[in-house]
Image (cartoon, rainbow, N blue to C red):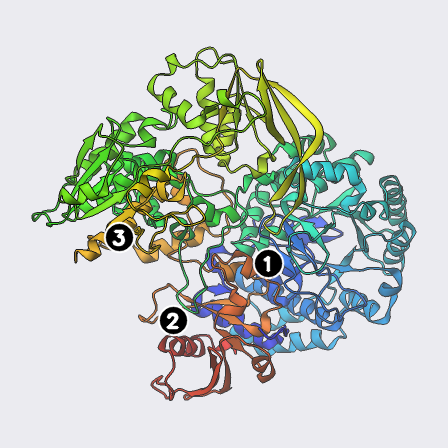
Amino acid sequence: MSGAMRPIPFKKLLDWILEENRKFHSIFGLPQEKFYRAQPGVYWQLFGEYLENVIGPAAGPHTQLAQNIVAAYLAGGRFFELKTVQVLDRLDIPKPCINAADEGYNVEWSTELAIEEAFEEYVKAWFLLHVLQKELWGTDRRGFMFNMSVGYDLKGIKSPKVDRFIESLKDASKTAIFQECRAVLQAEVDRFTAVDAEFIDGISPHICSSVTLSTMHGCPPAEIETICRYLLAEKRLHTFVKLNPTLLGYKFVKDTLAGMGYSYIQLKEESFSHDLQYTDGVALIGRLQEFAREQGRGFGVKLSNTLPVQVTRGELPGEEMYLSGRALYPLTLNLAARLAQEFNGHLRISYAGGGDAFNLPRLFATGIWPLTVATTLLKPGGYLRLQQIAAELATRMPDTAGEVIDVAQLAGLAAGVTRDPDFRKEKRGVASRKLTRKLPLTDCFLAPCTAGCPIGQDIPEYIRLVGEKRYREAYELIIEKNPLPFITGSICTQHCAAKCTRLDYDEPVRIREMKKEAAVKGYRASRPRCGPAQGKASARVAVIGAGPAGLAAGYFLARVGLGVTIFDKKEKPGGTVTHVIPDFRLSEDAIARDLELVKGTGVEFKLGVSPDFNVAELKRAGYKYVFLAPGAGASRPLELRTGGERVMGAVEFLAKFKEDRQRVRLGKRVAVIGGGNTAMDAARAALRVPGVEKVTIIYRRTREYMPASREELREALAEGVVLKELLVPYSWSEGVLRCQQMELEAPDASGRPGVAVKAGEFVDIPADAVLAAIGQDVDYGLLEKNGIAIDEGGRIVVDPATNETSVANVFIGGDALRGPATIVEAIADGRKAARAILTREGLTPPVPSAVPFDREWRLREVNKKKGNLAGAAGDPGLEPQRCLECGFVCNICTEVCPNRANIAIQTRNGGFRDQNQIVHVDGMCNECGNCATFCPYDGAPYRDKLTLFWKEEDFAGSQNNGFLLLAGGAEPVFKVRLNGRVQEVKFDPAGKANVDLEQGVLDLILAVYKGYRYLF
């Protein structure tokens, strides 16, 4: 990471393209099978130019360099809005400059290259697209177009260097770069199959006949109009003028964003009041339409520019940034609908604003085109996302003829957009899916779902097994780490889904449903599970509590041969899952099947015993080890000015409901206090109690900050539960629950806002019963009586590696250790303690054999999924098609890099674990930070991956581990930096290095040199 982004010479770009395609059947990392081939003979015309499709990259990171434009073309882009140039072309742009973790933000708005460099990139791309179209598909008619973008004021646009840029794109024939590209192609013509000298000579020097004008926020209307007239009349360019979402007005934008869950986005009212106003904008458009007709030029509007917002959570450097992506879509769509209405559909709109494969086909159907995208291409899949969009639009192109927008259809889209869950903040559900793990130099592929699962379930593998209908194998793979597949397949909170890569596509894979599918269909077919084949170990273990933690500990110990007895005060095992979780969420049959699995290992149960356990007595009775999993205590009491003594704990209510709902009496109106999953269960259960007519959940913040899973909340609301936000219970008397109104305060660094009381403002809610779901307290008294140490903060003292307490050979887990926790966390605690006990006994748990898959077939299937948006399937049998199998092949950092600076290197070396390794190319990187955003590790590939340097000064200006080629040939010499130490490394003809260096690093450097010479 030296900070020096270097344009690649045309000859080197050509070599790269031809060699990579020949050797690896890919170009800039895009595999041939993902190249988009347009329907033969189907074209659209815009300003007299032919288009095979109407989609392409917007002015931005994907049209800054020649290789970016090539990648976009191969994936399906045909309309290219070149990155904006301006007279100030030596800007010091703060880095990172992009944050597209969910909605997008950026702090750069024009090319980072000098104007002459930008021009050269566009000419290089122009030639490359021509020869690729001809060589790949044999097509002579150009089916793509370039649209230049300039800004930001008339003086700058009239400056000699911007004027030269404009004129050269209109006719590049006399420029040195045009002549160089043509000469290189002629010299290399024998390397082509379909391209010949005549075709090369026929490549037009007229690169752009159209322009998009980008002006600064706050540019006066008269200035905008003057620039447009200048471009139309004097420069003879078809012109789009880019308009800002501020035209909608401060109140509309603020209310729309807040209503969709983006209330944390902070606006400046002066950004609206100082910008072009709507009425003035409509009048300006009308005048320019008429002027363009007089000049014989085309005119339209580009909707929309990004929206200036304040940096409040450290998203990017500085104080102001620009909003894009799915939060911008409702705004741009509404602006398009309003303007289309103003002109009765007779308005050319070039669209960019949160478009993706889900919404652009609907937008296209209204008659709006061309369509450009940026934020969606920054996410995993990258340029490959264009293929899906292009293919979908191609099916609609013959039916969407004409120049007039369907105003009614567009208005309908705009009217419903704020209710569309795809664009509401809550759809994502998690702030970040990053792991707290350091990014390794090599072999970094991992499945984030597996890493995020407390028990490390082999999720991609069992999902693939389900997809291949190998249900028995899937079930047996699951129960190697999880003795409760039916229970977790029904009600697991899915830590895994919060890490799923598909969060950055659409929505997580329905992992829990896949587990249930494996359990239901693999359970009967599975080989019988039983105790150890050869006797039992001498050590005995007492487990206190038959909940998930206790059941897990017993299972993992007994199946290796230890004698295990599980004690519980209840007459039935299962703990919370048996006695509290309502049956509309978890069936008795699911519980029974998992208990059968645990019992099959030889575990003994002693039920209905006294809860007052005594560790010393258990040890005297012959139990060498004790695992404590008694669960949490009673619900935490709700403090009210009056009436608090009559409030019922949600857990206690659920236990009574589970035992016999017909005997529960709540009255007609029930209030549930809390925002977690227990509150959702209590509310849904209360609705099922005889006599209850209305249930209200009361929460102190707004719904987007509720800890309950989105699924649980949706189900509660769908069943008729009412949610009241920004309220805190104050008092309860005579059937009325009085609540204090709250308001959100500024968010902290994590993005979670504080809450403050609105003095003197109350809301009265009728309530015959109040259920408190605000947490549970652990009963420490019994633990302390048995010598278990508690620290000053009220936490049980344990060895974090084993969960052993201060009492030797006594372990603890589940709710008693953590406080109210999830089922899978309880299983993890039981498993951790079991492994510690087995280690002390010199025993090891059975090691499952590797699951066999056809690697080549699997790789082809994964590649097909890359870049394709697909919502969760209704049919569980189809859901495996959405899993990206990240642990098998990841390469996210290569996909999301607009500049293609992260390269997947095939090492063909048995010393590496992964399918390929990642090498970062320093000279192609502008440190935008996008790969760091989407890498699942707490790392940044552009800083942390082995880096190839092109120049000595770049190597010296960086701290990255990396290498610089000093001398080539059969015995190449490199300067190598590893962990701060710089050495000169020479390889002999056999590939042996002359220095003692980490072998994996040496192997990777040599693999790059031998297999990817075009990178140097």
- Give the mark, 2 or 3, whose residue is nearer the N terminus: 3
As drawn, the label of residue 907 is: 2
Could you give the CA–CA distance between mark 1 and mark 2, rounded to whole angstroms? 28 Å
Classed neighbour count for the residue bearing mark 1: other residues with Cα under 10 Å, few (<14), some (14–19), many (≥20): many
- Name the secondary structure under disc 2: loop
Residue sitting nearer the eye, 4 or 823? 823
- Give the mark, 1 or 3, whose residue is nearer the N terminus: 1
Residue 885: percent from left, percent from top: 39, 52
Lateral position of residue 841 relative to residue 127, left or right: left
Q: Residue at x 54, y 42 (%)?
A: 428
- Name the secondary structure under disc 3: loop
Disc number lying in front (2 or 3): 3
- Give the mark, 1 or 2, whose residue is nearer the N terminus: 1
- Type of amino acid at the residue the image marks with label 2: Thr
As drawn, the label of residue 215 is: none
Query: Disc 1 designates what residue?
Result: 73
